Amino acid sequence: MANGGGGGGSGGGGGGGGSSLRMSSNIHANHLSLDASSSSSSSSSSSSSSSSSSSSSSSVHEPKMDALIIPVTMEVPCDSRGQRMWWAFLASSMVTFFGGLFIILLWRTLKYLWTVCCHCGGKTKEAQKINNGSSQADGTLKPVDEKEEAVAAEVGWMTSVKDWAGVMISAQTLTGRVLVVLVFALSIGALVIYFIDSSNPIESCQNFYKDFTLQIDMAFNVFFLLYFGLRFIAANDKLWFWLEVNSVVDFFTVPPVFVSVYLNRSWLGLRFLRALRLIQFSEILQFLNILKTSNSIKLVNLLSIFISTWLTAAGFIHLVENSGDPWENFQNNQALTYWECVYLLMVTMSTVGYGDVYAKTTLGRLFMVFFILGGLAMFASYVPEIIELIGNRKKYGGSYSAVSGRKHIVVCGHITLESVSNFLKDFLHKDRDDVNVEIVFLHNISPNLELEALFKRHFTQVEFYQGSVLNPHDLARVKIESADACLILANKYCADPDAEDASNIMRVISIKNYHPKIRIITQMLQYHNKAHLLNIPSWNWKEGDDAICLAELKLGFIAQSCLAQGLSTMLANLFSMRSFIKIEEDTWQKYYLEGVSNEMYTEYLSSAFVGLSFPTVCELCFVKLKLLMIAIEYKSANRESRSRKRILINPGNHLKIQEGTLGFFIASDAKEVKRAFFYCKACHDDITDPKRIKKCGCKRPKMSIYKRMRRACCFDCGRSERDCSCMSGRVRANMDTLERTFPLSSVSVNDCSTSFRAFEDEQPSTLSPKKKQRNGGMRNSPSSSPKLMRHDPLLIPGNDQIDNMDSNVKKYDSTGMFHWCAPKEIEKVILTRSEAAMTVLSGHVVVCIFGDVSSALIGLRNLVMPLRASNFHYHELKHIVFVGSIEYLKREWETLHNFPKVSILPGTPLSRADLRAVNINLCDMCVILSANQNNIDDTSLQDKECILASLNIKSMQFDDSIGVLQANSQGFTPPGMDRSSPDNSPVHGMLRQPSITTGVNIPIITELVNDTNVQFLDQDDDDDPDTELYLTQPFACGTAFAVSVLDSLMSATYFNDNILTLIRTLVTGGATPELEALIAEENALRGGYSTPQTLANRDRCRVAQLALLDGPFADLGDGGCYGDLFCKALKTYNMLCFGIYRLRDAHLSTPSQCTKRYVITNPPYEFELVPTDLIFCLMQFDHNAGQSRASLSHSSHSSQSSSKKSSSVHSIPSTANRQNRPKSRESRDKQKYVQEERL
């Protein structure tokens, strides 16, 4: 080989060896593949060993082989001369582009000339046509019409094709979207094929039938050609279409593929232009509904333009650097991979320029000069904007991933540090059972650092997402369709409550529109806005939807404090989760905090309680289980009743426990309430430690109806079951009828014989009215049982109610839940200061209200309605006097004009003259409210008016000359329990308090907005400003109330929606969903005639305070046990005691002059009582309490022209009258109501 090589080099004809070496050197100079070099080497070795004839043949072809720069294989029929054919590929693209452009321009030119020529001869032809039409008959015009129709048909056909092509390529239809996405996907596929082929030489011989990538690329380009035709047909302006970027890409990528098939050659060429298709990436994502926000669209646009420009420029550098300059005969090329060119373009755009890779060709350097100008500008503008968009991306913009086996709730609305911390503190309280619920907060504003830290502390159960519930996309992100509930928080401190309620209503509408079945619990500020929720079709309170109206509950709590001072504090502590704080010192805080640890729970009662009366079960739970049961969920037997399940609070001994009855308990832990469910008489009857009462394995045997009734009769008659003759043969024969009439779950064991007698009596005839009256009158007697069992105590009224029905007078509203009177003009109830001074109001309620014509309405109706509940007799209603701006009260009067015993004194609560005119020292309660609290930005000044009014009243001094006229101001004597009652009951209330000579002793309750302002109410307390509200002395004493305590109702309602119903029943006086629907229609109570059904609604318990200073409970008041008092009151009078209102310094050995009291909730059985205690109790409605005064009270109640000075109004008596005043309470009341009627 060496010799041959030398010969070839010297002589030039040594033929084979020399030519082979020259080929190898040429291939190496042009950086061709290694396979080509190896093939050249093999051909060299074969040539050196061949004969002289083959050498001469090689020498003949030697001059032509000097120009060969591509690999040659014997299988590919390539050009034997080895010439480059890149110009053929490029020419195909250029001819296509410029040829088409020339045709379009030529067509436009000819069309323009034709239009000009036609325009010149158009007038002549038109004139000739008109003349021909006028001179010839109508039939001669038919050929012209036929031509016009032909033209119209032709235009219509072209238009149809054009429209069809436009539909095919547009993204407005499914076919168009699929086609657009497919074209983009195939373009990316063609670009990937280019990336693969870029590792091969720029130009090489390829067999189409054996090259798989070339076949795929050919298929792609055929599809692109068809799509190009559709686009061309659909284009309105063909010239602009021809110059579009996508058209240029097709010109330089599609024709070369067909040329490569024809020539069996492959030229990498300008196929890199397919990277320009990436510019449409954002459009494709929008077609697929992946990109929906402007920021995401903008971000993808910037990235796609940047990357496509980058890849396209790298492809051009790769082409020219690997090919070389044409004028240098392609000798100055260099071997660069495509990805090295990508790297080169990036360092060039960023102006870094490391110098490790650079362009050597003149074309490459010239391109880099111009690219630096545009690339640097693009890099400097696009990259910062891309980084900014990525940096501004929502930190909390992800989606919630539901955890299997774990529920989640969505909390939205007013999300702040205060509202979230209060909610989480109550929702995740340790006293609840294991809360396996994840809380997802959704708000359109990202949390601040403090709120973010709060979320991180609860990261295992709390997640936050930024978004709005008004956006369905955000609702989908938080998986609202699988959420257990959605809670909406309201801004209690907003300046415009109606606007805040409107926002929350819109949130409810949006959520219900997205998922109608979701349970929603929302806070509302104004009572009248609750009516708008009823307009939402999918809103259903029966399915768990609830609206917690803060104004309704706040004013309801305050109203109940007017009836039993301190009740607002006790109820607020019951539905709030408080941890037990143990104090060893014998202070008032020790007993108060022991009560604060109690909460309200619900649990189903054990079957061991079935058939027992409510007082019996209540006593058993308190004594044996250490639980206080205050209410049950009663299932009405009347199928026609609108709501078969109702919550009955202390219903009395006539109601028996049914199977599966839900009980409402006051306890310190949810685990304690389980005792009521696990209790078994057979297993737990002899257990003294309630902690040992746990689930047992025994099952209660089922007895037939005959056996249960038989055993019940034996209990009643005292005989053995075998000898009992209570059940007559006729009753046995009608056993099936009895079973249908009296379900087993509602039959009392003790009163079963009564049921049989009632059944037997009902067969021949009904009871006579006299017998009914006798039987009904025995109901309230402690030692008697009802002679007639009421099948449904919710619907059948007492007989005294039926006797007193007056069908001609409307005394109550249409539901029978509230006292009602005909609407009165506001001028008739206005008292001037002189008129108020001429009379003496006592035992009344003074409402000091701050507000003006521009203040937001606070809804005073919610304060008046509980004080006008129908379970009070008319003479028991406390007169209500409003002191405030008449302009504000006129705006509220539309909702108050149907309530009796309401007066208005125009003035200001800061005026002592106005306060003395309404005898504030003789009132039962003074309520201080403000409608201007949310109009001040400084939170510390929001309560300034209420605080000033409270301090003003407390600093007042009064004369004792009229103290003899004051009524019971703190003790509440239950009807029928005073010595002068018709029944001569030995029970009466507490002694009258000493005459009030200083304002400190006036019972006051002040509404606060800011909890920290409670420190300013009492100047003699030692509360720390950072102390929580429920730990402060004013709140513990019931003299301050803040709306923030109602935040706990959100979580309490979620865990048990019956809790909200119970609280609303207690504090609103009996507001029902039916009543809310009625108010939504008319915005006022509607009067109704008394019927047995409406009068039956009066038969419900109410809250009262009993004194232990004298009466039948006096012996227990001096060192007795609270448990003994509880059992005695429950057995004797069906009164359910649930707390104590005790003097603050009662624990001290030395007497104190302080009259402040604090609340003790659910004290234990052995708790020691003191004589000055006031007992919170739930009293039964007494039908007989109003009989002796019926004529007086009803005549005064029904009088539409009653004076504005009526009710609880006493004239100032003379000295003689004062000395000879009636001793009995009954005579005093008669004198008072006679004066009312005269007025």
Image (cartoon, rainbow, N blue to C red):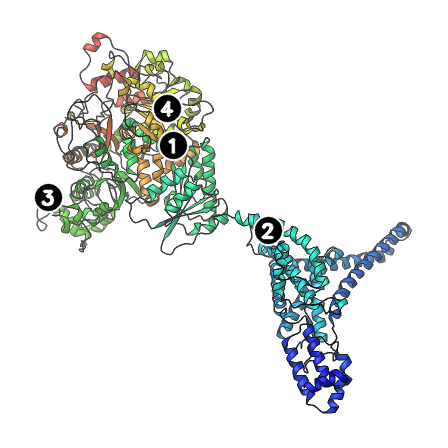
Question: Residue 595: image x %, image y %?
Answer: 23, 36
Residue 540 visible in the picture: no
Residue 530: name its quadrant.
top left
User: Which labelled disc corresponds to residue 717?
Assistant: 3
Secondary element under disc 1, as helix, strand or loop, is helix
Query: For mark 1, what is the residue?
Result: 551
Q: Distance between the residues labelled 2 and 3?
A: 97 Å
Q: What residue type is labelled 1?
A: Ala
Residue at the (61%, 50%) spot, across then down: 382
Q: What residue type is labelled 3?
A: Cys
Circles 4 and 1: CB atoms closer than 8 Å: no
Instruction: Specify which label sits upstream in the sequence, 3 or 4.
Output: 3
Question: Residue 855: image x %, image y %?
Answer: 45, 25
Instruction: Specify which label sits upstream in the sequence, 4 or 1.
Output: 1
Query: For mark 4, what is the residue?
Result: 946
Q: How far apart are marks 3 and 4 (CA)?
A: 64 Å
Instruction: Specify which label sits upstream in the sequence, 2 or 3.
Output: 2
Depth order, front residue of 185/722:
185
Lateral position of residue 685 relative to residue 403, left or right: left
Lateral position of residue 310 relative to residue 549, left or right: right
Circle 2 crowding by C-alpha within 10 Å: few under 14, some 14–19, many from 20: some
Secondary element under disc 4, as helix, strand or loop, is helix
State which mark lies toward you, 3 or 4.
4
Question: Residue 831: image x %, image y %?
Answer: 37, 15
User: Which labelled disc corresponds to residue 383?
Assistant: 2
